[in-house]
C-alpha cells in the first residue's frame, strides 16, 4: 500500500512539473515576443526618423537648387548688352534723349538723339563704358554733346547709376558734368528701355 501511495505521489509530481514548465515557456515566449515587438517598434521608429531626415535634406537641397537657378536665370536675363533708348529728365525739367549701345567687356557707345542734335548734322557716337554692381545695379558713363538753342553746344560727361526694374528697363539717377566753364553739375533721373531687336 505504501508503494502505491509513493507511486501515486510521483505521478502527481510528473503531472505538475510539465504544467510548471509549460507556464514558464509561455511566460518566456511572451517576454521574447514583447522584446521582438519592442525591437520592431524601435526599428520602425528609426526608419521613420531616418526617412524624415532624408526627405528634409532632399527638400532643402531642392530649394537651394531652385534658388540658385532663379538667381542664375535672373542674372542672365538682366544683361546690359544691347541697344537702349534713354530719356533723361533734369532737375530744371529739361528733357534729353540718347541712345546707348552696350557691347561686351564693359564697352559701348553713347549718342544724343535729341531733334536739336540734327541741326549741326548727324550726331556722332562717343565711347562709353558700363559695369554691373551688386544685385540689379548697373553704371554706365560717357562723353556727350548737347545742343543749346541753334548755335551752341554743351559738351560734358554723363554718369548713370541705375538698377534693372525688369530685364528690359533700367531706371535711376544721372549726373551731367560740363566740360566748359565753371558750372555746377546737373542732376536728374533717367529711364532706359531696351530697343527691340531687328
Image (cartoon, helix red, strand yellow):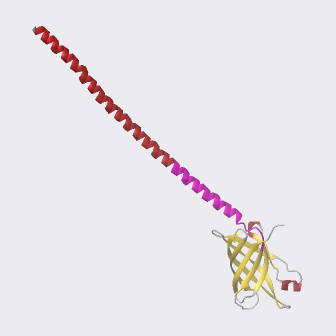
Q: Out of 102 and 59, give the one closest to the viewer.
A: 59
At horizontal 47% and vertical 45% (from top left) the residue drawn is: 50
The magenta stretch spans which residues? 55-84
- Residue 80 position, x and y percent, is 73, 68
- Residue 9 position, x and y percent, is 15, 15
Figure label count: 0
- Residue 48 position, x and y percent, is 46, 44
Where 4 sits versus 84, above or below? Answer: above
Query: For this view, does 115 lie left or right of residue 52?
Result: right
In which quarter of the view is residue 74 placed?
Answer: bottom right
In which quarter of the view is residue 40 placed?
Answer: top left
Where 66 sits versus 122, above or below? Answer: above
Query: For this view, does 166 lie left or right of residue 37?
Result: right
Quadrant where the C terminus lies?
bottom right
At horizontal 87% and vertical 83% (from top left) the residue drawn is: 118
Query: For this view, does 18 lie left or right of residue 71?
Result: left
Amino acid at each position: 500500500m505504501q508503494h502505491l501511495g509513493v507511486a501515486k505521489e510521483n505521478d502527481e509530481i510528473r503531472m505538475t512539473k510539465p504544467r510548471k514548465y509549460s507556464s514558464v515557456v509561455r511566460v518566456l515566449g511572451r517576454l521574447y515576443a514583447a522584446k521582438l515587438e519592442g525591437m520592431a517598434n524601435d526599428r520602425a521608429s528609426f526608419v521613420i526618423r531616418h526617412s524624415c531626415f532624408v526627405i528634409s535634406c532632399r527638400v532643402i537641397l531642392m530649394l537651394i537648387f531652385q534658388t540658385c537657378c532663379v538667381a542664375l536665370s535672373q542674372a542672365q536675363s538682366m544683361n546690359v548688352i544691347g541697344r537702349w533708348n534713354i530719356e533723361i529728365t533734369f532737375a530744371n525739367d529739361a528733357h534729353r534723349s540718347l541712345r546707348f549701345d552696350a557691347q561686351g567687356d564693359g564697352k559701348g557707345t553713347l549718342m544724343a538723339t535729341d531733334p536739336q542734335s540734327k541741326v549741326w548734322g548727324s550726331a556722332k557716337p562717343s565711347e562709353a563704358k558700363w559695369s554691373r554692381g551688386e544685385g540689379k545695379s548697373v553704371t554706365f558713363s560717357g562723353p556727350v554733346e548737347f545742343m543749346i538753342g541753334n548755335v551752341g553746344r554743351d559738351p560734358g560727361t554723363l554718369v548713370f547709376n541705375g538698377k534693372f526694374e525688369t530685364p528690359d528697363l533700367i531706371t535711376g539717377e544721372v549726373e551731367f558734368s560740363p566740360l566748359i566753364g565753371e558750372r555746377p553739375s546737373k542732376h536728374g533721373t533717367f529711364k532706359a528701355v531696351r530697343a527691340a531687336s531687328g
